[in-house]
Amino acid sequence: MSENRVSWIFLATALLAVAWGVWLKLNEPKRPEPKVEWVRVDGKLVEKETLEPFQGVQSIPFEGAPGMVQWDYTYVDGVRQGSAIEYYPSPNKKVKSRSTYIDGVEQGELIRYHSNGVVMSKGTAVDGLLDGVISFYQEDGTVLERRVYDRGAPAF
């Protein structure tokens, strides 16, 4: 056998081996991601096995409705920190409410929305309690009433 022919056979065999490897890789069955379990320890959301604190946005689904998100909470070092968004039960994630957490406690502006997207109520929270003037609106956006709260209790 000539040296040229041996080289071609070797090259063809190598190419077939590479093609076979690529085909196997592309067609290997997808393995499901291991389910990570999160628990609360000392007020922080941590991974159950490693106790590593959760970072980022945690999406909480509606019970009994997989694929539909009820809440998105932002976490830093296992503590709610930043935006919290609640959704109506719909596949297009219509916003039901927005608020902000600082060091795990609801603080600042709170907004709830009617299902048509118009503001339902707007006010503020201090240390997780309604505080100050809370305005309530009808579905067309007109003011329904205003109430004053003092650290969670109606102030008359």
Image (spheres, rainbow, N blue to C red):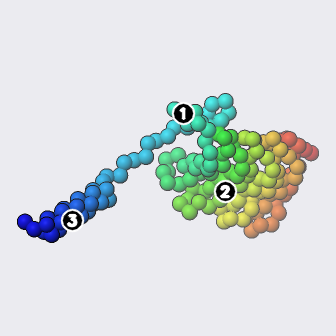
Residue most extreme to the left: 1
Q: Earlier in the sequence, mark 3 or mark 1?
A: 3
Disc 3 crowd, CA 10 A, few/some/many (<14, 14-19, 20+): few
Q: In the picture, which quadrant includes the N terminus? A: bottom left
Quadrant in which residue 50 is drawn: top right
Q: Which residue is mark 2?
A: 96
Q: Residue at x 65, y 59 (%)?
A: 95
The amino acid beneath tag 3 is: Leu
Mark 1 Cα shell of 10 Å, populated few (<14), some (14-19), many (≥20): few
Mark 1 or 2, which is nearer the eye? Answer: 1
**Residue located beneath label 1 in the image:** 50
Q: Horizontal placement of 37 versus 77: left or right?
A: left
- Tell me whether the residue at label 3 lies in contact with that at label 2, contact meaning CB atoms closer than 8 angstroms: no
The kind of secondary structure element at disc 3 is helix
Task: Establish if 40 lies above or below 82.
Answer: above
> Residue under circle 3?
11
Look at the numbered discs 3 and 1 and tell me whether their residues touch, using CB distance below 8 Å.
no
Q: Position of residue 137 (x, y in %)?
A: 78, 61
**Residue in front for this viewpoint, 152 or 28:** 28
C-alpha distance separating marks 1 and 2: 34 Å
Per the model, the C-alpha gap separating discs 3 and 2 is 63 Å
Residue 130 in sight: no
User: Which residue type carries mark 1?
Assistant: Thr
Which of pointers 1 and 2 lies earlier in the amino acid sequence?
1
